[in-house]
Image (cartoon, rainbow, N blue to C red):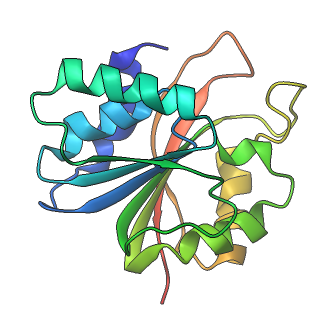
Amino acid sequence: MDHKDHVNLLRPANFTQENASWADLGAGSGAFTVALRELIGPTANIYAVDKDRASLNQLQRDHQIRFEDSNNLHLVVGDFSRALSLPPLDGILMANSLHFFKDKVKVLEHVKSFLKPKGTLILVEYNVDKGNLWVPYPFTFSTFGKLAKQSGFAEPRQLATAPSSFLHGFYSTITNKID
């Protein structure tokens, strides 16, 4: 996938809220963080969370090259499945990060605690229920529908799909926290 694919997977979410606070959980070197920033605009605060400081440093360099104002990008070195110091968030993006956890409901319930009431969750995932060494626990959109309900989220809506030569392609989905 390239930048255009990342943007196209997120674009149907129709980001309209100015001055929003979002987090990219499992941001890595920031391919989807950059796409999020492009779509949500310069007034949003984005918290890029990852355990790997070197990947976050690469994200910061790329972000500074691509965007004039990088003051709204906040790097957080940490594990999003544990306690983090984040403000209440309007939205969370999790692109290819939840598939590293076997107990997804537990992680989703924890992630939900970072969101404001009716906050938004966007996921990008491989569209398959059987993984491998590199993607241990992926899940289809259908499976995510069940996980979302068990975790206190509304019925998800599929946003887009993208082909992949690896594990049957990608999908993106959006849901909201139920209060």
Q: How many labels were placed on the picture?
A: 0
- 130 left or right of 105? right
Using the rendered view, name the quadrant where residue 168 is placed.
top right
Using the image as rendered, state which of residue 73 and residue 23 is in the foreground.
73
Image position, residue 127 (x, y; %): 68, 34
Q: Residue at x 25, y 39 (%)?
A: 37
Q: Is residue 14 above or below residue 1?
A: below
Q: Residue at x 66, y 53 (%)?
A: 79
- 89 left or right of 16? right
Image position, residue 15 (x, y; %): 22, 52
Most extreme residue toward the top is: 165
Image position, residue 98 (x, y; %): 68, 48
Using the rendered view, name the quadrant where residue 111 is placed.
bottom right
Q: Is residue 56 visible?
A: yes
Q: Is residue 169 above or below residue 37?
A: above
Image position, residue 58 (x, y; %): 43, 22
Q: Is residue 31 visible?
A: no
- 39 left or right of 102? left
Most extreme residue toward the bottom is: 179
- 62 left or right of 134? left
Q: Residue at x 23, y 50 (%)?
A: 14
Using the rendered view, name the quadrant where residue 68 is placed.
top left
Using the image as rendered, state which of residue 133 and residue 59 is in the foreground.
59
Using the image as rendered, state which of residue 115 and residue 179 is in the foreground.
115
Q: Residue at x 44, y 68 (%)?
A: 86
Using the image as rendered, state which of residue 28 and residue 104 is in the foreground.
28
